[in-house]
Image (tube, rainbow, N blue to C red):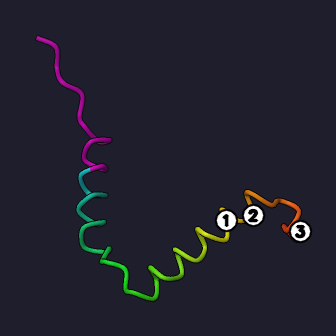
Amino acid sequence: MAEKAPLYGGQAVVEGVWLQFFTTKEPNNLQIEVSIAAFYRMKELDEYPEQIVA
């Protein structure tokens, strides 16, 4: 029988998901408000690219 290769990549994924579980939390209302405002501004600039200031 052939030996199985160690799953170092798989272990990293599991550890990454585990770490993400402990380091993420629900955004508060202000964070949601800012993300919505940024999204609408992005849509506006997408429609009117001449407003972009470089």
Q: Quadrant of residue 22?
A: bottom left
Q: Quadrant of the C terminus?
A: bottom right
Q: Is residue 53 left or right of residue 14?
A: right
Assign a secondary structure to mark 2.
Answer: helix
Total label count? 3
Q: Quadrant of residue 44?
A: bottom right
Q: Is residue 27 left or right of residue 46?
A: left
- Say if mark 3 contacts mark 1, CB within 8 Å: no
Name the residue rendered at 67%, 71% in the picture. 41
Q: Is residue 54 magenta?
A: no
Amino acid tagged 1: Met
- Say if mark 2 contacts mark 1, CB within 8 Å: yes
Assign a secondary structure to mark 1.
Answer: helix
The magenta-colored residue range is 1-13
Amino acid tagged 2: Leu
Kindly report the distance in space between the C-alpha atoms of the residues bearing marks 3 and 1.
15 Å
- Judge whether 44 appears above or below 3 on screen: below
The mark closer to the camera, 3 or 1, is: 1
* Disc 2 target residue: 45
Q: Is residue 48 left or right of residue 2?
A: right
* Disc 1 target residue: 42
Assign a secondary structure to mark 3.
Answer: loop
Whole-percent x, y for residue 1 in the image: 10, 11
Viewer-proximal residue among 12 and 30: 30
Upstream in sequence: badge 3 or badge 1: 1
Viewer-proximal residue among 44 and 26: 44
* Disc 3 target residue: 54
Kindly report the distance in space between the C-alpha atoms of the residues bearing marks 2 and 3.
12 Å
